[in-house]
Image (cartoon, rainbow, N blue to C red):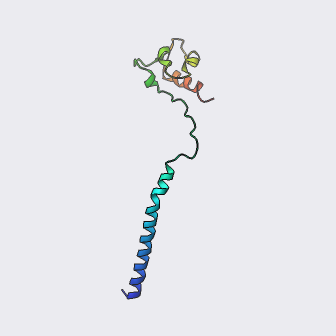
Amino acid sequence: MNHRLRQERNVFLLFLGAVFVSLMSALPVVTASLGTPRYSAVPAAPQQLTFEQLDRNRDGYVDRKEAEDQPGLSSVFDRADRHPDGRLDKVEYGKALSMIGPN
């Protein structure tokens, strides 16, 4: 390898090293600014519980007492109950969730 080519390679590698060092030194500044929220947070909607979470006695149904743990479910319980037996199966529970969905 001739002298001029070796010198150009060394200058290029030195340039790449300088670029790498400058990027790595700027990294903490960039990542620190990412952690701060720029906008106010939108309040989260109440979390909907799954059928299995509400069915505490594991009988395969959600009764009125168990339905009290899900906000809004008590108000649509009678309309979602296909068989007026006072309890919801999985299909009826899905129907009830769609009734109390976002307004």
Q: Would residue 57 be found to the left or right of residue 92 on screen?
A: left
Residue sitting at the far right: 103
Where is 70 relative to 27, above or below?
above
Q: Is residue 52 left or right of residue 97?
A: left
Residue occupying the point 43% across, 20% down? 55
Q: Residue at x 47, y 61 (%)?
A: 26
Q: Quadrant of the C terminus?
A: top right
Quarter residue 7 falls in? bottom left
Residue 54: x and y in percent read 45, 22
Q: Is residue 1 above or below residue 24?
A: below
Q: Position of residue 31 (x, y in %)?
A: 47, 54
Tell me where residue 97 sits by quadrant: top right
Please state, as top left, top right, bottom left or bottom right, where the N terminus lies in the image: bottom left
Q: Position of residue 73 (x, y in %)?
A: 54, 21
Residue 70: x and y in percent read 51, 22
Residue at far left of view:
1
Residue 5 or residue 43, whichever sits in front: 43
Q: Is residue 45 above or below residue 79?
A: below
Front-lying residue, 8 or 65: 8
The number of discs equals 0
The answer to which of 17 and 88 lies nearer the viewer is 17
Q: Residue furthest top?
A: 85
